[in-house]
Image: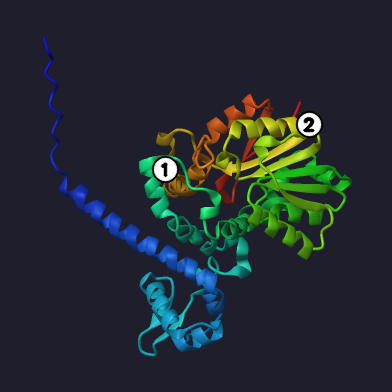
Amino acid sequence: MSKTKAAPETLPFDEAKSEAFTERFVSALNASSLMMMYSVGHRTGLFDTMDGMDWSTSSRIAEAAGLNERYVREWLGAMVTGRVVDYDATSKTYRLPPEHARWLTRKVSPENLAVTAQWISVLGGVESQIVERFRSGGGVSYECFERFHETMAEESAQTVVAALHEHILPLTNGLEEELERGIKVLDVGCGSGRAACALAKAYPASTFLGYDLCEDAVGAANALAREEGLSNVSFHVKDITGLEEPEAYDLVTAFDIVHDQKDPATVLANIHAVLKPGATFLMQDIAGSSHLEKNLDHPIGPFGYTISTMHCMTVSLAQGGAGLGTMWGEELAEQMLGEAGFGDISKHSLEHDFINVYFVTRKK
């Protein structure tokens, strides 16, 4: 005897909820538009130009920045209506308030929010390819992302390099003294090499090596090392799923790269293998939970899942990988570290940094 499927419960239409959603949508539309304009203001140097300027016309601002006035004027329209730049209608002049300039200019780089705004345009550049992958599966490879390493290097300079000595290295018991004496360090997924170069400059007795899959990033890293006159650091193109250097390093660092990998489990196991007994592994990744319901109040939850969909997950899938994604979560990270052979894992959050979490462990 067949069973009749119960009809789904029909709930009354909530008009207030519907209207509230449209308001949120319009707000998001304006906010995302401003993100694009923040990025333009950063890349053109307009925020830096306007910082400290008195009330000025669009022509004066354009001249000072060496830019076309018509484009500057339209950009200022977005900034004024977005309540970023002040406007005097009588004199038709503009001013960037110092309270806003603090968060938008290069002179205070560790607090320059406009750097992060660049991700919207970087990710938007692959939207059509991502849409196709929704249908066909697979992923979009690293080389398809225009300006990825340039933007990542700026982001790294703010989140990692600026915090290295005051906040990050003190998380590792005794490591600073070891670096001063001289140890061998490997930075996996080194990107454009800013973190490794900063460490190499601070600790000339130590030797630093950086590996990355992308040739353009490695080229930029070696160029930076030459520019800084550093002889104790070098960078090489290498797939870190194929590390075969048993017990070669006193310290391995991985800054925001493990979840992007084709095979994160193998990468972590390889890192364990290349460390000497008693050596340190320092891993930075994105703060958050492995469980969606625990990320409902995450301060940048939508952004985390968006950058995962548009970059971190897809570049792994493009290699036939696991596709863990940005929001793989701290629970899974600790589990995988344990499965790779690491014990006594300590987890740290920095007071000024709600985006990242740091794991420190030593090889037994």
Where, by quadrant of the figure, is residue 112 drawn?
bottom right
Where, by quadrant of the figure, is residue 294 drawn?
top left
Mark 1 neighbour class, 10 Å CA radius: few under 14, some 14 to 19, many 20 or more: few
- As rendered, which of 218 and 15 lies closer to the eye? 218
How many numbered marks does the figure carry? 2
Mark 2 neighbour class, 10 Å CA radius: few under 14, some 14 to 19, many 20 or more: few
Q: Are marks 2 and 1 in contact (CB under 8 Å)?
A: no
Q: Residue at x 41, y 54 (%)?
A: 127
Direction from residue 150 to residue 176 in the image, left or right:
right
- As rendered, which of 181 and 2 lies closer to the eye? 2
Q: Residue at x 77, y 33 (%)?
A: 275
Identity, as a three-letter code, of the amino acid under mark 1: Asp
Q: Is residue 360 visible?
A: no
The N terminus - image quarter: top left
Identity, as a three-letter code, of the amino acid under mark 2: Pro
**Outermost residue, top direction?**
1
Residue 161, horizontal then vertical, whole percent = 68, 55
Question: Disc 1 marks which residue?
Answer: 297
Residue 16, horizontal then vertical, whole percent = 18, 49
Q: In the rendered view, tell whether residue 344 sits above or below residue 261.
A: above
Question: Disc 2 marks which residue?
Answer: 246
First reached walking from the N terminus: tag 2 or tag 1: 2
- Element on which disc 2 rests: loop
Residue 69, horizontal then vertical, whole percent = 45, 85
**Outermost residue, bottom direction?**
91
Q: Residue at x 79, y 41 (%)?
A: 175
Residue 351, horizontal then vertical, whole percent = 59, 48
Q: Residue at x 70, y 53 (%)?
A: 195
